């Protein structure tokens, strides 16, 4: 028998044990997996690239790339701990699956400087607080209670807004004989920027250096003196800002019954754009319309009838049908573009849009996906800028309608559709075409901004708009009833997501009139990001991103243009100011502890003062040191009026002045 030396036996045993450990660690075993992860800032959502240590059990890695990876992690629940320079540590429990890769995202919250606090929150811009001037106090109170109240703190018109220092540009005319090249070169060498040249008046619009425009001094008058001393300048004058107030058209039915326009801040929006800057074509794919209506005839183009296959899209309602003899398409078209400010009947959202009537639904209001698809393609080829689809079906539409919608979107045509009236408040059943990718899906609200009892809801809803409710108030527009076939000047109320969608379509047409062509995805993002967040905080399945806000959308009042800061009760700065994010969140990193006021301000007209047309909000806030403070609920920022309802108290005025000054210092680099 061969005797094996003891040292060889020990070596064999050691190798065997090592192999067993290797198997247990997962080299060749099915009892381990891989863990990959990224580390992001919880506010900016960007990768954390400061040095971070990641631990899983007894193992750890160090990274500065914002990502990490572990192999051979034993299967089961494992705790992952991440600590990075300048951030609070974070830990999470993950489930590792054998022979698979688990991917996680770890969010870290940035630390404030020692002794200070960070504040994180979300804000929303509100529509005008009083949506209907003739509503009873009880009705308004019920609506306000249902929506957790609209903000009470609103800044008055700044007394400084008429002061010379509000001008951020100058009107400059060169001396006779001075060439354009010499004039531009001289002003640019002094740090001025030439915005534009106006040939009819011979004026250059000139912006001073940023530090001069934002600092408290010199004033606009002092800057004019500086430029007036130049030999090549004949004339200088401050280019004072002008900001229109709300416009109320003279249509009598608008004044008494179209509450739904005030609900989405349309009077304020009309001060910016009524639709006349660029004529927009809106295809109304519906039951057709009655072009004999005196409030519609001037807006209606030659359309097409896909029901009878001819060029006469006249709506002939069936009295025994679901619409009870009323013209659905006439009502929808009037909301979008009834002739406005003509001392007759109702107003339209867009005062100057062209309506392209396309009949796809018969007199009872019924149709098919195939005709809708055909009508969409036809409307795009006829030059439609926006398509309104106040119709829906509950079945999967199939490839033809899907392709037609994608064709419209690819051609730059925005498609707006009613979410449907299936009233599945607790369900998520989609309706089409509203639930198709890229379509702006509109749910409905009632007379007090409450969710309409009939409206469909779900994850595909983009925004909400007034659809009316028989329990509060219904939507008023142009109408026609077959029971009185020769009466063409009727005005009727209806309710439904069919009534909500044309409000959004009209707002989209105003945006395109003011801004020119925009990709449909950008239009949808602008509507979402400027809407009035109602219901659950953030996006929800009832309101989508919120109630559409026509004024905010037109002026591009996204929250990344707003500044936020903390003030003491005496309105002294208790933090620096910080810009918000497009997703309506904000973060302040250097707030002093104490009982303070959180203030938000969006300078919509860019005057540098809290004045009419801006959005402003404030609320009390308790700030604890060395910890992140999460603001409960939304900071509601209401539109500022010159003399309308709001809190004109000394405290609010002082807060407005304080946030102006802190923001000016930030912009000036102070």
Image (cartoon, helix red, strand yellow):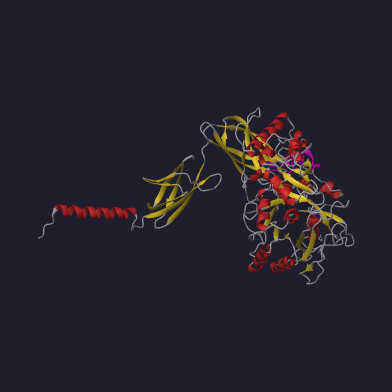
Give above or below for 211 relative to 525. above
In x, y percent, where is residue 548? 71, 49
User: What is the quadrant of residue 636 in the picture?
Assistant: top right
**Residue 142 seen from this side:** yes
| Residue sitting farthest toward the top | 570
| 85 lies above or below 26 | above
Say which quadrant the C terminus sits in. top right
Q: Residue furthest right?
A: 486
> How far from the left and from the top, in percent, is residue 92?
46, 45
Q: Nearer the viewer, residue 494 or 562?
A: 562
Asked if residue 289 lies left or right of residue 76, the reply is right
Above/below status of 374 relative to 440: below
Residue at the left extreme of this rendering: 1
Segment colored magenta: 125-148
Indicate the quadrant where residue 391 lies: bottom right
So how many labels did they put on this image?
0
Quarter of the N terminus within the rendering = bottom left
């Amino acid at each position: 028998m061969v005797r094996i030396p003891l040292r060889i036996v020990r070596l064999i045993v050691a190798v065997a044990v090592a192999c067993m450990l290797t198997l247990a660690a997962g080299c060749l075993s099915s009892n381990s997996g891989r863990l990959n992860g990224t580390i992001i800032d919880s506010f900016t959502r960007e990768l954390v690239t400061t040095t971070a240590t990641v631990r899983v059990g007894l193992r750890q890695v160090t990274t500065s790339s914002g990502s990490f990876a572990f192999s051979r992690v034993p299967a089961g629940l494992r705790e992952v701990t991440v600590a990075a320079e300048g951030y609070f540590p974070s830990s999470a429990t993950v489930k590792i699956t054998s022979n698979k890769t688990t991917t996680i995202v770890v969010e870290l919250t940035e630390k404030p400087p020692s002794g200070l606090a960070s504040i994180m929150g979300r804000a929303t811009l509100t529509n005008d607080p009083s949506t209907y001037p003739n509503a009873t106090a009880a009705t308004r109170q019920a609506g306000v209670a249902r929506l957790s109240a609209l903000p009470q703190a609103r800044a008055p018109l700044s007394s400084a807004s008429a002061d010379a220092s509000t001008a951020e540009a100058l009107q400059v005319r060169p001396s006779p004989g001075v060439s354009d090249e010499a004039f531009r070169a001289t002003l640019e060498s002094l740090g001025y920027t030439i915005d534009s040249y106006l040939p009819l008046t011979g004026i250059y619009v000139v912006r001073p250096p940023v530090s001069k425009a934002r600092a408290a001094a010199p004033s606009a008058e002092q800057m004019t003196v500086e430029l007036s001393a130049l030999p090549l300048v004949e004339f200088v004058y401050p280019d004072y800002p002008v900001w229109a107030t709300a416009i109320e058209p003279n249509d009598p039915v608008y004044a008494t019954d179209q509450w739904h326009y005030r609900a989405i801040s349309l009077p304020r929006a009309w001060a910016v754009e009524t639709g006349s800057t660029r004529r927009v074509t809106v295809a109304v794919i519906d039951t057709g319309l009655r072009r004999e209506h005196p409030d519609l005839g001037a807006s209606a183009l030659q359309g097409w009838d896909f029901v009878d296959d001819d060029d006469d899209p006249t709506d002939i309602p069936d009295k025994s049908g679901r619409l009870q003899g009323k013209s659905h398409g006439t009502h929808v078209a009037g909301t979008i573009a009834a002739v406005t400010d003509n001392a007759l009947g109702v107003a339209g959202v867009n005062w100057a849009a062209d309506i392209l009537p396309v009949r796809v639904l018969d007199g009872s209001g019924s149709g098919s996906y195939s005709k809708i698809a055909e009508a969409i393609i036809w409307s795009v080829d006829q030059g439609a800028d926006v398509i309104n689809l106040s119709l829906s079906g509950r079945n999967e539409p199939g490839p033809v309608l899907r392709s037609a919608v994608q064709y419209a979107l690819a051609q730059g045509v925005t498609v707006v559709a009613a979410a449907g009236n299936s009233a599945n408040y607790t369900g998520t059943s989609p309706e089409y075409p509203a639930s198709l990718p890229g379509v702006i899906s509109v749910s409905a609200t009632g007379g007090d901004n409450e969710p309409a009892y009939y409206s469909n809801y779900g994850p595909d809803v983009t925004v909400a708009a007034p659809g009316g409710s028989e329990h509060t108030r219904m939507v008023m527009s142009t109408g026609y009833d077959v029971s009185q076939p020769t009466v063409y000047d009727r005005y009727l109320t209806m309710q439904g997501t069919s009534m909500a969608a044309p409000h959004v379509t009209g707002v989209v047409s105003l945006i395109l009139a003011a801004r020119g062509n925009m990709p449909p995805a950008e239009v949808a993002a602008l509507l979402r990001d400027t809407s009035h967040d109602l219901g659950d905080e953030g996006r929800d399945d009832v309101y989508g991103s919120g109630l559409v806000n026509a004024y905010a959308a037109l002026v591009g009042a996204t929250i990344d243009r707003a500044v936020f800061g903390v003030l003491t009760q005496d309105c002294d700065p208790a933090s620096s100011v910080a810009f918000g994010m497009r997703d309506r969140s904000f973060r302040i990193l250097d707030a002093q502890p104490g009982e303070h006021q959180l203030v938000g301000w969006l300078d919509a007209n860019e005057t540098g003062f809290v004045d009419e047309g801006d959005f402003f909000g404030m609320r009390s806030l308790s700030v604890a040191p060395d910890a992140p403070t999460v603001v409960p609920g939304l900071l509601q920022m209401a539109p500022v009026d010159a003399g309308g309802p709001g809190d004109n108290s000394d405290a609010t005025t002082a807060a407005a002045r304080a946030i102006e000054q802190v923001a000016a210092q930030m912009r000036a680099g102070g």
